[in-house]
Amino acid sequence: MFIQIQPHSDTPIYIQLTQQIIEGIVNKDIEPGESLPSVRTLAADLGVNMHTVNKSYHELEKKGLITIIPKSGAIVNVPRKMGNANAEQLDYMEKMLRPVVAEGIVQGLGMNDFEKLIKRLMKTLY
């Protein structure tokens, strides 16, 4: 698993870590059923605090992407099939996308621009 942390980024390290693990699952660098490194090991490898990794793992667990098994580690869950999002997941995605879409509209992006952007992202991630 290759993770690159940008310590001077405006994005908190635990969010960078969470996002990179999610992308690793999407592009199959991290397989369903695979164990993630222990909190201590990953923190040492990345040169970050153990609490940072722990916070990231708990965020992933809240999202249903991993299962944390006390004293055993974290296991990647089997991904859901595309197109089967529930109302809670859709509400969460809407909440996360809303400020990005609003900023895009202010910058002059239209519906076609957003469709192209989403298609481009889906191609690069999936």
Image (spheres, helix red, strand yellow):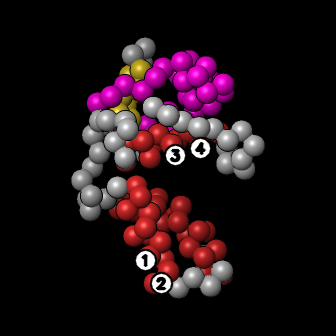
Disc 3 residue type? Gln
Residue at mark 2: 111
Q: Which label is found at residue 80?
A: none
Residue 88, image x and y in percent? 39, 58
For the residues labelled 4 and 1, the Cα–Cα distance comes to 26 Å
Question: How far apart are the two marked residues, 3 and 1, measured between alpha carbons?
Answer: 22 Å
Q: Residues within 10 Å of mark 2 (few under 14, many from 20)?
A: few
Query: Which x, y percent locates residue 116?
Result: 44, 76
Q: Quadrant of residue 1?
A: top left
Q: Which residue is mark 4?
A: 15
Rendered residue at 44%/46% (across/down) = 23
**Of the residues under marks 2 and 3, which one precedes in the sequence?**
3
What's the magenta region? 33-61
Instruction: For the residues labelled 4 and 1, say whether their Cβ atoms are less than 8 Å apart.
Output: no
Which residue is identified by label 1?
A: 115
Residue at 57% across, 29% down: 53
- Which residue, as the protein is rendered here, is positioned at the far top? 71
Q: From where the camera sits, is residue 62 visible?
A: no
Q: State the mark number for residue 19.
A: 3
User: Callout 4, which amino acid?
Assistant: Ile
The mark that comes first in sequence, 4 or 1, is: 4
In magenta segment, residue 56: yes
- Residue at position x 31%, y 59% from top? 85
Residues at discs 2 and 1 in contact (Cβ within 8 Å)? yes
Q: Nearer the viewer, mark 4 or mark 1?
A: 1
